[in-house]
């Protein structure tokens, strides 16, 4: 179930849904939902999956993906130049806002959620 903790997998699921493609998930026991793969820990993990409980190596990638999934401009709260392109520092995008929620939501690793992402979760 390690892939279920990756925000990028959520983005790939979003693109699959938007393109109208059919998605089948398989486990070692067979296709999810079939008679041979209708229950078990992996099936339970898929059923309980929540993109809010996913991570990326780079915080900006997570923010950009969550912006896209929420339907807001992808570079919202990511530093941009005057043309709207992401500003890169050492090849990495930079967060515009680095404020964290003071109580409540925590990220998968236990640190407080970024305020922008918490707002996305609440509003979308």
Image (tube, helix red, strand yellow):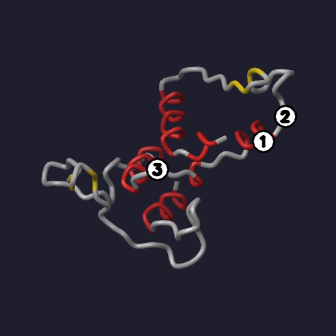
Alpha carbon distance from label 3 to label 2: 28 Å
- The residue under label 1 is 44
Q: Earlier in the sequence, mark 3 or mark 2?
A: 2
Crowdedness of circle 2 by 10 Å Cα count: few (<14), some, many (20+)? few
Give the residue drawn at x 43%, y 64%.
116
Give the residue drawn at x 45%, y 72%.
100
> Which quadrant, please, contains the N terminus?
top right
Residue found at the very far left of the displayed protein: 82
- The residue under label 3 is 56
Horizontally, residue 96 falls left or right of residue 88, namely right
Alpha carbon distance from label 2 to label 1: 7 Å
Q: Earlier in the sequence, mark 2 or mark 1?
A: 2
Alpha carbon distance from label 1 to label 3: 23 Å
Determine contact: label 2, label 1, CB under 8 Å.
yes
Asked if residue 14 is positioned above or below residue 124 in the image, the reply reads above
Expressed as whole percent of the image width and height from the top left, the position of residue 84 reads: 20, 49
- The residue under label 2 is 39
Horizontally, residue 49 falls left or right of residue 99, namely right
């Amino acid at each position: 179930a390690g892939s279920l903790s990756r925000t990028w997998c959520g983005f790939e699921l979003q693109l699959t849904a938007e393109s109208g493609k059919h998605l089948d998930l398989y486990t070692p026991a067979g296709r999810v939902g079939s008679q041979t793969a209708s229950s078990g820990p992996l099936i339970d993990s898929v059923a309980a999956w929540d993109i809010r409980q996913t991570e990326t190596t780079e915080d900006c990638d997570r923010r950009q993906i969550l912006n896209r999934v929420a339907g807001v401009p992808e570079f919202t709260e990511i530093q941009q130049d005057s043309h709207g392109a992401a500003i890169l520092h050492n090849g990495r995008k930079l967060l515009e806002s680095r404020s964290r929620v003071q109580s409540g939501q925590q990220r998968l690793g236990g640190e407080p959620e970024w305020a922008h992402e918490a707002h996305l979760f609440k509003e979308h």
